[in-house]
Image: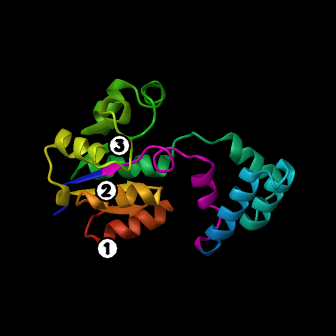
């Protein structure tokens, strides 16, 4: 039985460019979106061409893609509201590879205490996802067994890392997808 739901920070509770685009691009077009990211990373596309191709894929203008790019690292308010709703019936955790300084800017100590029962920072553990040690630190912090936890992350390698220690895990693609998968597990979201 699931007693705790543990979330990743970036790409789940906070937007990054990829998570913002996932809300605009239909799931069947995610592979094409990844191809555009890779082409941009390799320098095969100019910045303008990168914005234009992402705009075409998502059905918005290149200016809207530029604006979205500037909004990365903002809270995913729908997911934060989900955290608050789940907190009523479950232990809720945050497990992040993000540096301490950044987390301090994102979550004040009072807010951290209000939102999360488990708060694991990689730098304190000395391990990063997908290493087993970081998931085990989250379990220990919450006084939980692996089979009592559900982990949500946007990176499949991190989802696989959680599964390797016995947790249930979901790759985050969108808010609606997470709510659907929680309902499939009998979790009222």
Element at badge 2? helix
Residue 95 bears which disc, if any?
A: 3
The residue nearer to you, when weighing 111 against 26, is 26
Q: Quadrant of residue 70?
A: top right
Element at badge 1? helix
State the residue position of label 2. 162
State the residue position of label 1. 184
Name the residue at 44% across, 51% down. Answer: 79
Q: Position of residue 51 (x, y in %)?
A: 80, 54
Q: Earlier in the sequence, mark 1 or mark 3?
A: 3
Name the residue at 69% across, 47% down. Answer: 68
- Mark 1 or mark 3, which is nearer to you? 3
Classify mark 1: residues with Cα within 10 Å, few (<14), some (14-19) or many (20+).
Answer: few
Is 172 above or below relative to 29? above
Quadrant showing the C terminus: bottom left
Classify mark 3: residues with Cα within 10 Å, few (<14), some (14-19) or many (20+).
Answer: many
Q: Indicate yes or no whether the magenta region holds residue 10.
A: yes
Q: Earlier in the sequence, mark 3 or mark 2?
A: 3
Q: CA distance from mark 1 to mark 3?
A: 23 Å
């Amino acid at each position: 039985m699931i007693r705790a739901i543990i979330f990743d920070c970036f790409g789940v509770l906070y937007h990054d460019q990829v998570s913002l685009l996932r809300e605009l691009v239909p799931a069947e077009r995610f592979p094409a979106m990844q191809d555009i990211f890779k082409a941009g990373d390799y320098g095969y596309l100019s910045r303008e061409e990168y914005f234009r191709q992402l705009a075409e894929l998502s059905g918005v203008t290149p200016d809207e893609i530029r604006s979205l790019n500037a909004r990365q690292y903002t809270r995913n308010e729908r997911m934060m509201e989900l955290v608050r709703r789940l907190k009523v019936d479950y232990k809720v955790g945050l497990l992040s590879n993000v540096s301490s300084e950044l987390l301090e800017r994102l979550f004040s100590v009072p807010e951290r205490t209000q939102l999360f029962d488990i708060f694991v920072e990689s730098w304190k553990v000395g391990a990063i996802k997908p290493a087993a040690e970081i998931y085990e630190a989250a379990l220990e912090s919450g006084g939980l067994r692996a089979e009592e936890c559900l982990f949500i992350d946007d990176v499949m390698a991190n989802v696989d890392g959680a599964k390797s220690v016995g947790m249930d895990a979901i790759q985050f693609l969108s808010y609606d997808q997470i709510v659907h998968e929680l309902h499939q597990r009998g979790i009222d979201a």
